Image (cartoon, rainbow, N blue to C red):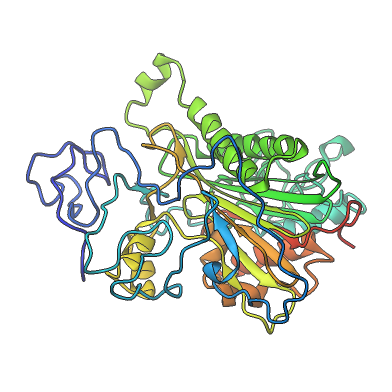
Amino acid sequence: MSQMPQQAAPAKCPSCAEPLESGDLFCGACGYDLSAVPAAPQDHPTLTMGAPGVGPSGVDWPPPEPESSSTPASPHLPTDLPGTDSGGKPLPASAPHGSPAPQGSPAPHGSPAPHGSPVSPASGVRFDRPPVPDDDYALQAPDPRVAASAAGNAEDGGNGGHGENTAGAESSGSGAAQVCVACRAGRVDDDGYCENCGHAQPRERDHMEQESGPVAAVSDRGLRHHRNEDAFAVGHTALPDGTPAVLAVVCDGVSSATRPDEASLAASRAAGESLLAALGQGTHPQAALHEAIVAASHAVNALADEPTSAREHTPHQNAPACTIVGSVVTSGLLVVGWVGDSRAYWVPADRSAPPARLTEDDSWAAQMVAAGLMSEAEAYADERAHAITGWLGADAYELEPHTASFKPDRPGVVVVCTDGLWNYAETAEEMAEIVPADVALRPLHAGRVLVGHALDGGGHDNVTVALLPFPAPPQGAGSA
């Protein structure tokens, strides 16, 4: 198995933070192989693999395709869709996803050079989840779909899921004793635990659903995590000329950092508010998304400004951090932006047309594939696959959001999600298979179906998905 070029040993073990000596090949505390990933400098920076950021002057809108064109390009891979990068230039050509770039050809956008060329080593690597034993949560959490059904029956119709928690039991305002959502028999005590089976009851963020016009999102804690560290923001607005626009932002807290749930919530809120404000002022959607990611980064960075006394109690904890992916869709333009390993997929309404993955992960596995050192199957099967090389947080070296715009030649839907979903539908073809055919008419229902697919697959991580129709329908159109 090929490895990244040999580097000098880092000052601390990237796995357990134990101090290291110069020349160490393995950590003396945990045995971590120090040659497995590039060493991080003292300030723990991260490698960002995006194009230069959009300047304050904005980006020219891509010209519309000629109506007389009889053979429009079919979407297949991100670079097959006509679009521009965050510098306003055409997206460079790349090898098919999962295959190393051919010798002598340019590397995929934002990726290291192919095998045989000097590989740009990562400036920093961060594991997006702490090492925990498989049996850390031996008792699985109750299936939220069962809990939601029970809650809906108890509340005589439910709340419709518009931005509210749907995983709870009976409404606390009803005056009746709360019944456990897991066993449906025990009474829930004041601390939120069932007196019969001991299950902790769902919290506000354990299961969230929201619709905003034609766009919808669903987030769930999953069946193994003790809390939901994902967050999202969805919205719809109109550009100054009346053109409709829909947006979605999905954030995944980095579990190996402190307060990841706060990081994802702060980032999603800041990005969503920034997008709505910028689009309403007429900012180009691609520039607006770039600015939104920067605003999200500032919001996460602010969480690290805690009192000195708090840092003294937890001196070895990392700064709060999260990944982010977002999309803006108008009547003729599809824009995506991201930092980290959360993803966006394109699924055409005509399922005979090929789908596409629109983002490239900031991860160890993606670097190995892009450098031609490993196949995609080998890289994502490795235990280091989910080590991320880009994130939002005060300990990130620098921020260069990845953004790209596309002009699909047919209607479809953009799937924006965390790895809690794409781990169970990794390729674009697999994702297209599980997206319901009526997603444009019932986006909230489709979101529930996709979350259910991840739960049926094991629900080993938090699961969040947002769905945006392309083209954005006129204002007032929503789910049926």
* Front residue of this view, candidates 76 and 206: 76
User: Which quarter of the image is occupied by the C terminus?
Assistant: bottom right
Residue pictured at 43% horizontal, 53% vertical: 136
Measuring from the top left, give residue 11's x and y in whole percent: 18, 37
Point out residue 38 in the picture as x, y percentages from the top left corner: 23, 51
Please state if 359 lies on the left or on the right of 82 as rendered.
left
Residue 359 in the image, given as x and y percentages of width and height = 52, 60
Q: How far across and how far down the image is residue 35, in percent? A: 17, 55
Could you tell whether 4 is left or right of 465 in the image? Answer: left
Asked whether residue 140 is in view, the answer is no
Q: Quadrant of residue 407?
A: bottom right
Residue at 53% in and 49% down: 86
Residue at 43% from the left image edge and 60% from the top image edge: 109
In the rendered image, the residue lying farthest to the bottom is: 352
Q: Taking the image as drawn, is residue 76 in sight?
A: yes
Identity of the residue drawn at 71% across and 42% down: 188
**Could you tell me which quadrant the N terminus lies in?**
bottom left
Q: How many marks?
A: 0
Q: Is residue 288 above or below residue 330?
A: above
Residue toward you, 352 or 430: 352
In the drawing, does residue 320 fall left or right of residue 250?
left
